[in-house]
Image: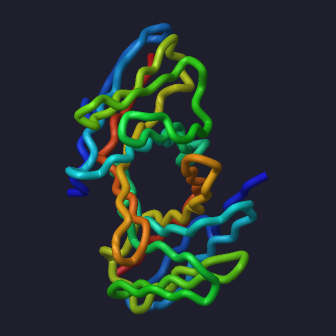
Amino acid sequence: EDQVTQSPEALRLQEGESSSLNCSYTVSGLRGLFWYRQDPGKGPEFLFTLYSAGEEKEKERLKATLTKKESFLHITAPKPEDSATYLCAVHKDEDYGQNFVFGPGTRLSVLP
Amino acid sequence: DSGVTQTPKHLITATGQRVTLRCSPRSGDLSVYWYQQSLDQGLQFLIQYYNGEERAKGNILERFSAQQFPDLHSELNLSSLELGDSALYFCASSVVASGGYEQFFGPGTRLTVL
């Protein structure tokens, strides 16, 4: 069965304290892995798509990496405005269409 | 602002009723995806349409149905509502950009079933 897990469930950091979030997956027919940021009560905001092991993408203080079984979202010198829930999702090609399986998310709090 | 619009923002109804949620994708995007997000289930993929045709089905109940119209807007119909259907419902549209596949979510419709 396809599964996506994320750890830790919640993370509290001091401003400037770098850390990493983990996304582990077991899926068949992986087409890509997505990272999103979600603020309370709002729709997820697209961050990155990764397609192959060894791929890395960066955006401001965020860097996403991908291996064959997991992905990491590295947050360098975070600021309070980085506080949000970070979701990862695997994108699968299922025959004709596409399907997305989301992880439960990591709630990040960055304290000033 | 992602460019994906959803109406209404909030919906309060009673068990057994039927509601319709509406979504307009970003201009030019042909795909529409529907998701349900509840506290205990996380974000669950329901169904995808591409240019008017159903493309993929996820964990969508038989009481739920969707369609995409020629102008590409989509509607999600929820019937015989139960308390457990209370959730945030998101739609998203997608595009293949230079960096790869990107998906953009609307602001959601919060459904409360009393």
Nearest the viewer among B21 and B24 is B24
Q: Residue at x 48, y 11 (%)?
A: B15
Looking at the picture, does residue B37 appear above or below residue A19? above
- For this view, does B108 lie left or right of residue A63? left
Residue B78 horizontal/vertical position (percent): 45, 20
- For this view, does A4 lie left or right of residue B53? right
Count of marks placed on residues: 0
Residue ranking furthest to the top:
B16
Looking at the picture, does residue B107 appear above or below residue A92? above
Residue A54 horizontal/vertical position (percent): 61, 89
Residue B42 horizontal/vertical position (percent): 56, 48
Q: Residue at x 36, y 75 (%)?
A: A82
Nearest the viewer among A18 and A55 is A55
- For this view, does B26 lie left or right of residue B84? left
Quarter holding the N terminus of chain B is bottom left
Q: Residue at x 56, y 25 (%)?
A: B84
State the scheme by which the image is colored: rainbow
Looking at the picture, does residue B40 appear above or below residue B82? below
Quarter holding the C terminus of chain B is top left
Nearest the viewer among B45 and B57 is B57
Residue B2 horizontal/vertical position (percent): 25, 57
Quadrant in the rendering for residue A5: bottom right
